[in-house]
Image: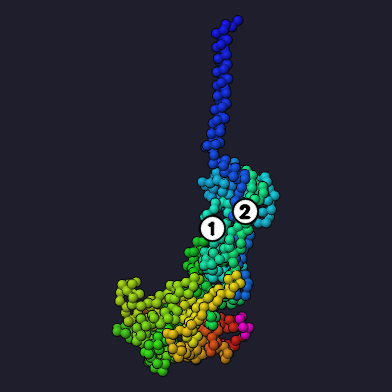
Amino acid sequence: MYNEKQIKNKIIRRVLILGSFKLLIFSVIISRLYKIQVIDRQKYKTLANNNRINLVLHAATRGKILDSAGNIIASNRKVFALTITPFLINNINNIISDIKKLIDISDQEIILFYSKLEGLEKSDVPIPLKEYLSWSELSIISVNKPNLSGIDIRVSSIREYNRGSYYSHIVGYTSNVFNQNINATKVGKFTAGKVGIEKIYDSYLRGTPGTEQIEVNAQGNYVRRLSLKKSQEGNNIQLTINSQLQNYTHKRIGSNTGAALIIDATNGNILSSASSPSYDPNIFSKTLNTTEWKKISTSPKAPLINRPINGLYPPGSTFKPVVALAALKYGLIKKTDKIFCNGIYTLGNRNFHCWNKRGHGKVNLTEAISQSCDVYFYEIALRLGIEKISDTAKQLGFGSYYDEFFGVSKSIIPSKKWKKNNFNKKWQKGETLNVGIGQGFLLSTPIELAIMTANLINGGKVTIPSIIKSLSGDKIKQETINKNKNFEKEHLEIIKKGMFNVVNSIKGTAWKSRSIDKKFHISGKTGTSQVRIISVKERAEGIIKNKDLPFDKRDHALFIGFAPYKKPKYITVVVLEHAGGGATKAAPVGRDLLIASRKIIEGIDTKIPVS
């Protein structure tokens, strides 16, 4: 028989054992609750939110870019990407393995995925595993999606450039960005313009994004839509570019490196603008790999440069009409005054040579322009001085601001102050002679040469370049073209006549590029820009021909032209880098571009001499 003490001890032991057991159970429960409510609070809060509402931001469809006839240059194409949300998956490797059994996933795509995953292993950020799914791949994933937790299909759009490389420098390209104000994982891709029209008019083209609230379960699968605000498509932009003319301009340049422009002489509209070499802007719409980018960005021919607007070249003899007009403006020469050229102009102890080593004899102003006599322009440049030449060039459009697309030219129109600021040296008379024939420190862009030409031949009108025809169907009002009060109409007509003789006089440098159609006489000015210094020894032994020089030491070939002579409709500028002589290389291209402009826009053929 147990005594009372033994019974009491037994009860106490049982109570202690039972109490300890209960305490252990409660400790486990409390510990678990603490972990859930305190340690893992954020995790379960996110899970709860994910189980309830997801905010999705829908990128707006980007506005189209059209040519002058309304043909599409840039549009949009829907693309689909397979994404994985790490937070919703216990074993990512297993999921990727399951996906690989369904569609092809390359090793490079897996490596890229894991590089993006780093630091986001517990994130609810959807990370793309495979971009640009084909229709077949999309169908397979859609069917198997219920069995693959944590995966989703992201729908976005990419820019599609329907006419490829011929428009790349005008239109530019876009690349993917994320909205910084909202969680990037829930908004998908957006595109932003990087260069050209795409960049300048990015906010206009982009449109307004839409928002959608959807209820999802813990696995991230769709339950129902709670709200939807549709995105608004971006605005369309129509350019002044004529696609037929743009295609022809590129084809006519061919494999040459350089630039060619055609503008409407009556209003400054850009009808074609070709930069060679070019590139396919579609490669920037997708993920651009390092190899492709390096190939483009380090190419010695610099395909990314928009040469008509940003290419800087010594204008050579195409600048001589500016010097001639300055001499007339300041009364330093009359059109009948003659200067003798024996092939050499001596200043101090230095000789400056004419391209014609035998000389041109006595020539007046229009003859000097048509035959491109260097000695004539050395003399009148020295009479003028650099300041008057610089001021006249600026009055004709060099260094001007036009609009956001053309911007401010980075050309160099040297002066005494410019040299002092850049070299801390005084200006020399010999440098004025070099500028007088379009060489030396002088650098200009093709668009400036086009505007200069327009301002010379339009009877004193100021021409402003434009590349936008309409915005969302609303035509752009042309800026009022005012009279240029800096020049006498009589003086401008003298320069214009000189440019007529360049092409239509038998002694003119571009005689072989003439038209024999009396209703479409072509006029212009050739230019050959040296990119190297010719030594005294080389002159004595014989100047090395361009074809025998390394490519980067050969002369640039230039031509500025317009047609018809009496009432100009079209202006062209051609710059061919390291191509040789302007008369033999650039002028025939310029002639063909002017003739093509008439044929394509007016439907009229033009007769040229049979060679």
Element type where label 2 sits in the image: strand
How many residues crowd mark 2 within 10 Å: few (<14), some (14–19), many (20+)? some
| Residue 433 on image: x %, y % | 36, 82
| Location of the C terminus (image quadrant) | bottom right
327 displayed left or right of 23: left
- Sequence-wise, the earlier of marks 2 and 1 is 1
| Residue 234 on image: x %, y % | 59, 64
Three-letter amino acid code at disc 1?
A: Val
Looking at the image, the residue that sits furthest to the bottom is: 336
Do we see residue 132 in this rendering? no
Q: Which residue is mark 2?
A: 212
Do we see residue 296 in this rendering? yes
Measure how far apart labels 2 and 1 are at the Cα level. Answer: 20 Å
| Location of the N terminus (image quadrant) | top right
Element type where label 1 sits in the image: strand
| Residue 466 on image: x %, y % | 53, 75
Residue at x-position 57% and y-position 65%: 205
Residue at x-position 52% and y-position 54%: 181
| Residue 449 on image: x %, y % | 47, 79
Magenta segment:
599-604
Looking at the image, the residue that sits furthest to the top is: 1
Give whichever of 179, 281 is nearer the camera: 179
Within the magenta stretch, is there residue 280? no
Three-letter amino acid code at disc 2?
A: Glu
Look at discs 2 and 1 and give the one toward the viewer.
2
Q: Which residue is mark 1?
A: 177
